[in-house]
Image (cartoon, rainbow, N blue to C red):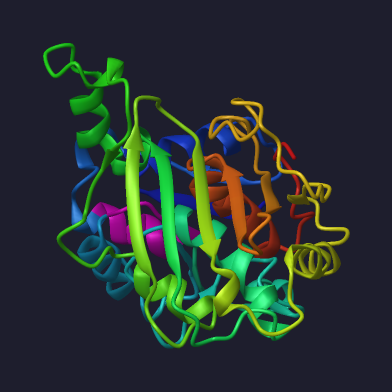
Amino acid sequence: MKPRVYIDGQAGTTGLQIRERLGARDDITLLEIDEARRKDPAAREELLRAADVAILCLPDDAAREAVALAADSSVRFLDASTAHRVAEGWTYGLAELEPGQRAAIRAAKHVANPGCYPTGVVLLLRPLVDAGLVRADTPIAVHALSGYSGGGRQMIERWEDPATGLASLPFEAPYALDREHKHVPEMTRYARLAHKPQFVPAVGPFRCGMRIEIPLHAALLPAGTNAARLHAALLERYAGEPFVAVRPFDASAPSDERAFDPQAMNGTNRIELAVLPNPLGHVLLLATLDNLGKGAAGAAVQNLNLMLGLDEAHGLTA
């Protein structure tokens, strides 16, 4: 029998994207819920228990409830919400995190899909912390720019409402400045940071795309560490990775205004990393990705493939 997959919450932004990526595949059976019973706990429980893998595209509390509904069954869960990303008993679904992570995902019953912002932050910092090129106790600041689809249906509707004028906003709009963003614990744990980073997210007047910038002050880098060494560490860690690309190192950073377009990776499951030197010895780490691709739905399909023992790149665009 083909593996049975149920997307709980497929009407949401991420769920729709996952459904689109899986819809044409003939190697799995997608279980569908009747639209009229989409919020019926009994109907959802029936499909959860019938599935080999259930992908949860739900608010955090609803994701926890879904797991509880079928906790005593054989279904494996892939949770795209924030609910379980730092929870005990859940495997972090970032295949490129470290050697052995793919095997852990393949074997896990509970996999937490990474967040879009943490995907870039962790892939930039983790190899450098592991190599001792960035100290774990270094004060880290992160500036990130995302398309408005990252905020889900409500944000999409608000930004695309002609009455708000947000779609033609000529600048980015920072947000969550008055609270701890829900992605900060995830960044801290998986980048192996001793302190929570200062995280400054912003939304831009475009639907999809993401750019993440992490400035490293020269005074905070270990002696002998420079941009070239940081770049070499990233290049070594991600050699052969199908979805992680490291830009060639150039001692003079590109000055082209379009060089780091946050929409450049849209439609792919690819993330591109860059290390940019500064004459004063400072370094800028930079990542670009599709917040709904490698940052959400694409990563979920990659994890699903691993959980089902398939080629992880099946159905994805690098």
Q: Position of residue 93 (x, y in %)?
A: 57, 67
Left or right of 286 in this view: 54: left
Left or right of 314 in this view: 138: left
Left or right of 54 in this view: 261: right
Q: As drawn, which residue projects farthest toward the front?
A: 280
Q: Is residue 85 magenta?
A: no
Above or below, comparing residue 192 to residue 8 in the picture: below
Which residue is nearer to you in this view: 242 or 297?
242
Residue 240 visible somewhere in the drawing: yes
Residue 133, by quadrant, is bottom right
Q: Position of residue 222 (x, y in %)?
A: 66, 84
Left or right of 258 in this view: 38: left
Q: Position of residue 257 (x, y in %)?
A: 59, 26
Give, as a single range, the part of the protein colored magenta: 43-58
Which residue is nearer to you in this view: 303 or 247?
247
| Residue occupying the point 21% across, 42% down | 37
Residue 285, by quadrant, is bottom right
Above or below, comparing residue 273 to residue 233 in the picture: above
| Residue occupying the point 36% across, 75% down | 185
Quarter of the C terminus within the rendering: top right
Above or below, comparing residue 122 to residue 273 in the picture: below
Q: Position of residue 118 (x, y in %)?
A: 48, 62
Quarter of the N terminus within the rendering: bottom right
Q: Is residue 49 magenta?
A: yes
| Residue occupying the point 27% across, 63% down | 181
Residue 115 visible somewhere in the drawing: no
